[in-house]
Image (spheres, grey):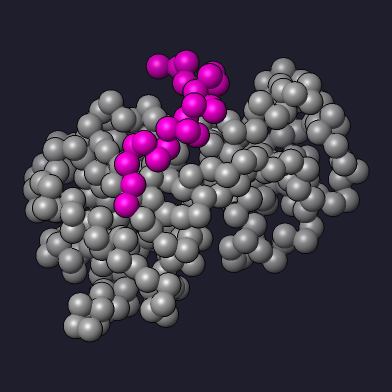
Amino acid sequence: MREKKNYRTCVHDGKALFLAFFTFLLVMVPIVSRADSKISPDVLRFGIFPYKSPKTLIDMYGPLAACLEKKLGKKVQLVSAPDATSFFEQVKDGGYDIIIPSVTMYYKLRPVGYKVIAMGVPGFYGGIIVRKDSGITSIAQLKGKKVVAQGEFASAYLSLLPQLAAEGIVPHKNTNIQFAGKVDSLVYGVLSKKYDVAIMRLDTLDASPLDEFRDQFTILLRSSEIPQFPIAVKTSMDEDMIAIIRKTFTALSPDIPEELTLLKSLQIKKIIAATDADYQDFYEKVKGSDYFQQP
């Protein structure tokens, strides 16, 4: 019982969350270099892929960083980057100790010294959405339309390319496709009619404040299940520390109200131990895309 009490305290540690938020704002721009991070060897840098706004990422992952601080007894900095490219370069340079990258980006990062230790479940789905009043009712109608996706790396986008191709749609050839970076921007872009179509992870529409707009969209196409973003650490990290980090994540219980709130904010039911092998099946489905042919 004492262990659970300590954990619940870390979930609600306002001071830790404030420090995490303050640190996050400081490191968003400019990005702290690997050399700078070596100045404080007792600090763990927890890098979150910038798929949502900084405020949203703080709300989602701040409690997790605070919990790690309590369990590890050392400072955990919740950090990110301005965009996907900057995040990728920081990870390649060893700038983060713990990372939650996008699923597809992780495949490119595996050779640079990180390994998966945990993952959220269940997975999520990619989808193609349009406004209900758009007049678009079939995939064939996407030709010539303004389409938006998060990026060429986005798992929702890559997972749906084969299904689109089967319908004669090749985004870079017969649609006007753009990449917006943040998933929230996709929803607002279609809502405001800046874009006709969005290719995105569908659980974006389930979280506040975007859930209030869900009834305004039609889902034209849905992907097969995609595994959640992996939680990975440097392969050089001490094994005892890795064990504590993994246990902290996997011990989160939906039976404890505070922890259920945390899990819901991450849009998962629980976190389980995982390895690279848990992502191999999905990788086999998307590895032939242009994204993986790029350096």
Q: Main secondary structure of the magenta part?
A: helix
Picture quadrant of residue 139: top right
Residue for point 50% across, 34% down = 282
Residue 65 picture location, percent across and down: 28, 61
Please say if 262 is above or below 31: below
* In the image: residue 21, left or right of residue 170: left
* In the image: residue 196, left or right of residue 133: left
Magenta segment, which residues? 273-295
Residue 220 picture location, percent across and down: 78, 43
Residue 2 picture location, percent across and down: 19, 83
Residue 33 picture location, percent across and down: 22, 37
Please say if 100 is above or below 58: above
* In the image: residue 64, left or right of residue 130: left
Query: Does the segment drawn in magenta span residue 277?
Result: yes
* In the image: residue 132, left or right of residue 29: right
Residue 10 in view here: yes
Residue for point 58% across, 63% down = 207
